[in-house]
Amino acid sequence: MTNLWCHPGLRSSSPIRHAQGRLRRGSIHLVLSLILAALFVACSDKDSDVTTSPSDDSSSSVCNDCEDGSSSSVTPQSSRSSMVPEPVEGYSSSTISSSSSVTLATPCKTETEDNCEYGELTDDRDGKKYKTVKIGDQWWMAENLNYETGSSDCFSYGDPNCVKYGRLYAWGDAMDSAGTWSTNGKGCGRFGKDCSPIYPVRGICPNGWHLPDTTEWATLLAAVGGREIAGKKLKSMSGWYDYKGEKGGGTDDFGFSALPAGLLGDDGYYDEGEDAYFWSSVQRRSIDAYEVFLCNQWDKAEMSKFTGSKDYPVSVRCVKDDVPGQTAQFSSSSAKSSSSVTPLSSDSETSVSSSSSVTLATPCKTDSTDTCEYGELVDDRNGQIYKTVKIDDQWWMAENLNFKADSSFCYNDSAEYCEKYGRLYMWGAASSACPSGWHLPDTTEWKTLINAVGGQSTAGNVLKSMSGRNSSDNGTDDFGFSALPTGYRNEDGDYFDEGSDPDFWSSTENGNSYAYHMDLGSGDYAYLGCIYKVDGFSVRCVKD
């Protein structure tokens, strides 16, 4: 099931949103099963005007009632509970960020003509041939992967469905967690298993191709016109059920031809004819990973923090290696030995461009020594003094902001938590809360920090404090950033994850309702992702 935290229909006050809160507090398969069941029941809409859906269809689309009324003004994004940068919503320009760009693709297909640039891929493992298509600067498979593994599935166990839709793969299978074809995704297995994949992850893809990360998916969505219309542009013209009298399929303007293959959940197969799900190579947490989601009920494409359970098999589309703008992620072991590296390309339009470089910061703190370069910030509004730290070329607050403002809160409404963790801010309050001479970091500044401390796969570990967590998931705090497990506040005033997750706002919006934030959750990873602006997160300011 897809855990789309930027899913427009998942309001903070909804039962599904509350279920997400329970999931964040550590529930496992049982809760996922309940969420899956709740989504199908709540979204069944059996009285709707679905014109071509079979009358005996017992499942229902997960995308009903998904309008939130917000406009889709766009700037780069940052996701639900967290990931590293995602695609731009409603993008109408070829510019992805100030430091990188995406070429807008030219529509090449109509109902009567097809002038797209196609190719053919032969999988040397089983001889299967796949149609491929060039969209912008990327080459994509124009069909779903159909390479058989012992744990992959055909929809409804039917071999003809594998021919029609390709096979469905759990995330570990898609990542080649056994390391059969490459080692970059080795160990990225089942639900509850944390891992640190190294970009690019070939995974289950044929030689010369790889499982796309969120940056590559973001590039595709931006190239076809932005996330608000990407679903319509990428969906096949036929094979999708209509919804309330409206055509459920797409225009397939670029020859991507996404088919509604559905998925396999705990209780069986769902959403054939209604939804398409595609894995990325980016883990969200030990229990889920990012995926792209297309639905027969809307024109948009979703890639957000309500991510997919690793155990629920969905489709795979592979992207060709060595496309322009593609950069290799470095591992923590190699990062320490080099003074300069090309930044990793991980999540989307806010990624640092391939032409820039980041100097790796030198670790300066251990259990017994601390040689970091610290400073002191005095907030002239209330006289509060904060420790600051220099990491590479940036000066950061080494403590969370504790300036009282409207729409800011102490965890559990208790002043002792403000003293311990600083305040939790809704995004509107956070955007103007920093002291004079400092500001709320945007996603580019957060990404610069991630790269400087060794990359996405290790940044969570080296930025987290050495103590304070409820489990053994403390960090090494190599650079004196000392991220504390503050937890967060949702729209309804409920508090979660104290002793577990640190979440920090960025200044980057994603439409009217969402903004990006940095999540240093369980494991070693750091993520930038988008979430509701009305949620409450911590604030770290960076020097002007």
Image (tube, rainbow, N blue to C red):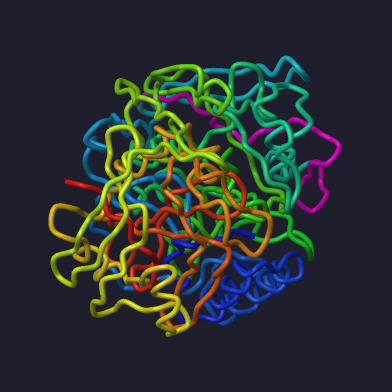
In the image as oriented, which residue stretches furthest toward the right? 150
Image position, residue 353 (x, y; %): 32, 28
Q: In this view, which residue lies farthest toward the front? A: 368
Q: Residue 274, relative to residue 338: is it above or below?
A: below
In which quadrant will I find the N terminus? Answer: bottom right
Q: Can residue 111 be seen in the rendering of this structure? A: no
Q: For the magenta stretch, what is the residue range?
A: 137-159
Which residue: 68% across, 60% down?
A: 471
Establish if 209 lies above or below 41.
above
x and y percent of residue 334 in the render?
A: 54, 20
Does residue 217 appear to the left or right of 51 in the view shown? left
Q: Of residues 510 and 149, which is closer to you in this image?
A: 510
Residue 10 percent coordinates (x, y)? 48, 71
User: Does 156 appear in magenta?
Assistant: yes
Nearest to the observer: residue 179 or residue 42:
179
Instruction: Identify the main secondary structure in magenta.
Output: loop
Residue 353 is covered by the magenta coloring: no
Is residue 165 or residue 186 the one in the foreground? 186
